[in-house]
Image: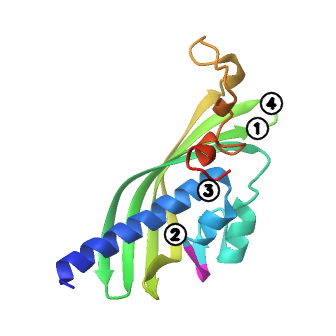
Amino acid sequence: MDKDLQDLLDRAKIRQCTERLARGEDRRDADLISASWWPDATYDYGVQSGDFASYLAWVVPGADAIKNTQHVLGQTHIELDGGRARAETHVISYHRIDMGAGDQDTCIGGRYLDTMEKRDGEWRIASRVMLYDWYSEWGDAIDWSQGVMGIPLSAEHFSGRANGDFSEAFFGKR
């Protein structure tokens, strides 16, 4: 295969891996998360670090105090080196957190520094470091049971991602 075409495919597979992981984290889906990391992978998020098993135990089921998350991925800079690659992906992550006196909405801007490895034709994360660029507390969370901008949300599929995500039914997963 032409090297340029192979590089294009490898970059797409690396990006898909990062996207799959973000989707898995937002849904606390152990299968999606596990499909994105090599079992011998390591991570360092500053607030916690270790091996993949400790990461998975931390993210799934997730802290009871963190009711909802959304990871929005930005550009990814990828440098390929055979069966290894280095990738920097910008991320903005939203978190709804029970701070003890009601839910608060917070947001973090940062970057994932991933060392990716291709094994048996599949790209996954071998190592990740999270860099934090900014953090913002948005204050009291809105009660979604009251709707959006005063307009009620009446259907069950508006329950959020971490609890019965409607997109799973949309894609035929349940």
Residue that carries the numbered disc 3 in the rendered image: 25
Which residue position holds label 2? 129
As helix, strand or loop, the secondary structure at mark 3 comes to helix
Give the residues in magenta. Answer: 37-41
* Quadrant of the rendered image containing residue 14: bottom left
Label number found at residue 99: 1
Dominant SS in magenta? strand
Label 4 crowd bin: few (<14), some (14–19), many (20+), radius 10 Å: few
Does 9 appear in magenta? no
- Amino acid found under the numbered disc labelled 2: Val
Please report the residue visible at 57 percent of the width from the left and 43 percent of the height from the top.
170
| 50 on left or right of 17 | right
Residue 43: assigned label = none
Residue drawn at point x = 52 percent, y = 77 percent? 127
Give SS at disc 2.
strand
Q: Is residue 165 left or right of residue 62?
A: left
Q: Earlier in the sequence, mark 1 or mark 3?
A: 3
